[in-house]
Image (tube, coloured by chain):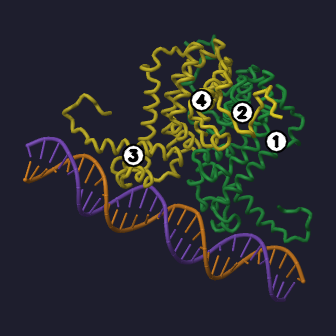
Chain colours: A yellow, B green, C purple, D orange
Amino acid sequence: MNSSTGHMEPQRQERALRSRRDILSAARMTFAQFGFDGANIRDIAEQVGVTHTLIRYHFGNKMELWKAVVDDMFAGLSAAFSNDRTGEIDLRTRDGLRSWLRLYIRYCAEHPEHVRIMIHESMAATERLEYMVEHIRLSHAGLIPVFSRLMKQGVVPDVWLVSFFYMISSICQMPFVLTNAIDQLYGVQMTSQAAVDAHTEAVIALVLGERSHDPSRWPTLPGWAETARTKGHPKT
Amino acid sequence: MNSSTGHMEPQRQERALRSRRDILSAARMTFAQFGFDGANIRDIAEQVGVTHTLIRYHFGNKMELWKAVVDDMFAGLSAAFSNDRTGEIDLRTRDGLRSWLRLYIRYCAEHPEHVRIMIHESMAATERLEYMVEHIRLSHAGLIPVFSRLMKQGVVPDVWLVSFFYMISSICQMPFVLTNAIDQLYGVQMTSQAAVDAHTEAVIALVLGERSHDPSRWPTLPGWAETARTKGHPKT
DNA sequence: ATAAAAACTTTCCATTTGGAAAGTATGAGG
DNA sequence: CCTCATACTTTCCAAATGGAAAGTTTTTAT
């Protein structure tokens, strides 16, 4: 919306732009954690260090703020997958899919809030879900022909497209959505490089049947989850 | 807690038991939809047709109600996977895993609230997550040795255990967590028998590499998602 | 029948929350 | 330096919310 060419335009003050950006960022995290109903704009404002009425000033109301967050998020997703960065990826090949999976997993690890917000809003059929689905539709529409092609080529299993979509999405996304639970349960920081790498390997193994495994680099698990992988090391 | 042997004990009234059960049920759905913070006990009470203070009477406070819901939910899960129903499943074999996947997918399709609540609570490191994780630990602890064995046998990919767990869980659970989004996006009712079947097939194909596909029974997708599967039917 | 316990409601309260209105500070252009 | 739009704050309000206290009804036991 903002043309970057104009030096003659009214040009918002720096402060205002920073406020908008900070509010958007705080709102994103808060909506991701509590959902729309659970989030409150006063908390968001406090995180940024402004009064809650400034949010109203910049965004109108809670709903409009939410929409701005979603637009901003999907813009970020598009940017991360723009041709600038993925120009060399030809998704119609096995190598392309592998690269795409790596890229997508990285995005999920870096932006767990994105999927968290999407999941929150999928829990009920609301106006917000409708709004969000139009963003999702764009992403999916671009991938459908590619995925179909990969199925026909036998690179990936030839299954119901909806299932395939959500299986691929889920395995890339969920471990990073559930970082808190995994930390508590397995004592593993999913966002650590080792965990991201181990998971990337796992996804590629499951989807493409490739095993590049180097178990020594997998994050170690607590005693109750030990699988006695280090055989030949009797502790008695 | 209630000994069923005693005819001398105070013995709760029928009405009270029904109230408790109805409240628990309504609370479950509400927590699943809005999360703990987003849910409010007055709405729950109204759904049941009682006053919100009755919830306080039976459960103490919102937090205790939530815990009761979780306990109840996990009890239901245990029941669904009790030896009564799965006694014949030997999870250490390929056939066993296939049966287990079918059973688990059915559970997820029938009880999407369960995973919805778990996901809500995984969004932040709270006392509630701690509480829930102890339930989850029990489930996982029982499955770890089995999954490890299947990996060693080569029935499933030999990957990092945490990844494997969450990949398996996610692909079984998420399409039913996201029913609203899938309905809106693809116009498909995930809880329909056809969709559950198609998804079950897909999971087995991905995890076990088995393709029993009968695409004609897959739910059809809207035009924008058409993959021109019916070739030889030129419409021009 | 009657007392006592259990089940449930009415009423009230303090806090939180989204939003509205009115006022103040800030900085860019004349 | 002055003014005026932009950026932001203070103050207020009504509704929603979790919880507490005090009541009323229903059931059980004697």
Measured Cα–Cα span from mark 2 to mark 3: 41 Å
Residue located at (82% from left, 46% from top): B79
Callout 4–callout 1 Cβ contact below 8 Å: no
The picture places residue B84, in percent across and down from the top left corner, at 89, 42
Residues at discs 3 and 1 in contact (Cβ within 8 Å): no
Which numbered mark, 2 or 3, is in the foreground of this view?
Answer: 3
The answer to which of marks 4 and 3 sits earlier in the sequence is 3
Query: Which residue matches tag 1?
Result: B81
Crowding near pointer 3: few (<14 within 10 Å), some, many (20+)? many
Is disc 1 in contact with disc 2, using a CB cutoff of under 8 Å?
no
In whole angstroms, how far apart are the C-alphas of marks 4 and 1?
34 Å
Q: As rendered, which of A181 and B64 lies closer to the eye?
A: A181
**Image spot of residue A21 (x, y percent):** 37, 41
Q: Quadrant of residue B116?
A: top right
Badge 4 density bin: few <14, some 14–19, many ≥20, Cα 10 Å: some
The chain to which mark 4 is attached is: A
Q: Amino acid at mark 2?
A: Val
The tag on residue A194 is 4
Residue B109 in percent (x, y) is at: 71, 39
Give a yes or no on whether discs 2 and 3 share a subunit.
no
Is the same chain shared between marks 4 and 2?
Answer: no
| Residue with the mark numbered 2 | B196
Mark 4 in CB contact with mark 2 (< 8 angstroms):
no
Please report, as a chain letter, where disc 2 is located.
B
On the question of residue A201 being in view, the answer is yes
Query: Subunit of mark 3?
Result: A
The three-letter amino acid code for the residue at tag 1 is Phe
- Position of A40 compared to A189: left or right? left
The residue that disc 3 covers is A23
Reading the chain from its start, which is encountered first: label 1 or label 2?
1
Q: Quadrant of the C terminus of chain B?
A: top right
Element under disc 1: loop
